[in-house]
Image (cartoon, rainbow, N blue to C red):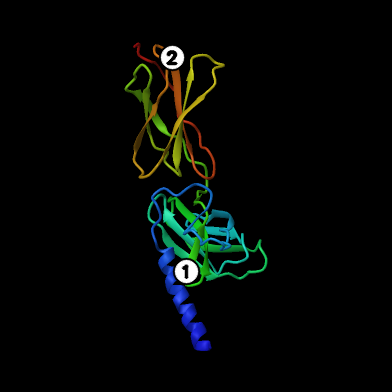
Amino acid sequence: MLHEKSRRLVTAGIIAASLISATPPAHAAPAGRSSTGPEVGHIQSDPPDRLRASHITGNRINITFVDGSTNENYFFVDYRVRNGDWHGLWQAPTQSKKSMGLQYSIYQSVSRNTIYCYRAGTLQWKGFRLIKSVTGTYCATPAAPSKPANSRLTNIGSTSVNIKFDRSSKWEWGYYLWAKRAGANSPWEYKGSLVVQTTKETYTMTANGLRPNRYYTFMVEPYNHFGRGPASDQVSATTASR
């Protein structure tokens, strides 16, 4: 009996490791859950709740989550640098199979001035299969990003304008683009966002849906999971006539 139990534990570890190391799609959803798809009639375990990751020091991150189900067999945590490949960080059998709400906390040593992202999940046995449920991605950023620099306009057309700017020097995850018509009381209009895939020194965004021969002001605003940083300097131009 003991031999059979040991065999099942070893098999579980091998299968779990192979599932965890699998690379997901390049763009993970910012929220929600995913799974391998349970069989009809199977009660699937929910992924963990309240996944968080925060810097304790410049090179150490604390990852926490709360048990969101009662029928999982294993928990796991994966990490990646920005939008890179996922890597397994931590795996352990569940410690609370009868009550939800138990908080788990682990630590990772990291490189300084680098954005690390995390996801947590559950593994559940269904016969000889492991069913996987995964949280959305949460990225650890110790502060809001810094201000983008040297914003300027290019390719000024009748209905679109490009804004070019130098990246924030720290912690940017992406940028929002805003535009408004001339006049102090004109509202800012959202014109799109850019998620940074690979850091570059200069980025370009395009504001579409403008009207010909109108005076507009533009700015870009950096953001990350911590919050929004200071917007770039405002730049203005008149769109071309048709």
Q: Among all residues in the image, which is located at the extreme left?
A: 155
How far apart, in angstroms, are the residues tagged by discs 1 and 2? 61 Å
- Dot 1 or dot 2: first in sequence order is 1
165 lies left or right of 38? left
Q: Is residue 233 visible?
A: no
Up/down of 189 relative to 146, above or below: above
Q: Residues within 10 Å of mark 1 (few under 14, many from 20)?
A: few
**Residue at the spot x=43%, y=14% of the render?**
215
Q: Is residue 16 left or right of residue 204?
A: right
Label annotation for residue 215 = 2
Q: Quadrant of residue 97?
A: bottom right
Amino acid on which disc 1 is placed = Arg
- Depth check, mark 1 against mark 2: the one in front is 1
Instruction: Name which residue lies at 50% across and 68% down.
Output: 91
Query: What amino acid type should be assigned to the residue bearing mark 2?
Result: Tyr
Q: Which residue is mark 1?
A: 129
Tell me whether circle 1 and circle 2 mark residues in contact (CB < 8 Å).
no
Q: Tell me if mark 2 has few (under 14), some (14-19) or many (20+) residues whose alpha carbon lies within 10 angstroms of its own.
A: some
- Residue drawn 57% across and 16% down? 185
**Quadrant of the rendered image containing residue 159:** top left
Across and down, in percent, residue 226 comes to 54, 44
Q: Is residue 203 visible?
A: yes
Going by the picture, which residue comes out furthest to the front?
A: 40
Residue at image position (46%, 82%) is 7
Residue 230 position within the rendered picture, expressed as x and y whole percent measured from the top left: 50, 34
Q: Secondary structure at mark 1?
A: strand
Query: How many numbered callouts?
Result: 2
Q: Position of residue 26 (x, y in %)?
A: 38, 50
Instruction: Name the secondary structure under disc 2.
Output: strand
**In this picture, is 174 found above or below 106?**
above
The quarter of the picture where the C terminus appears is top left
166 or 3: which is nearer to us?
Answer: 3
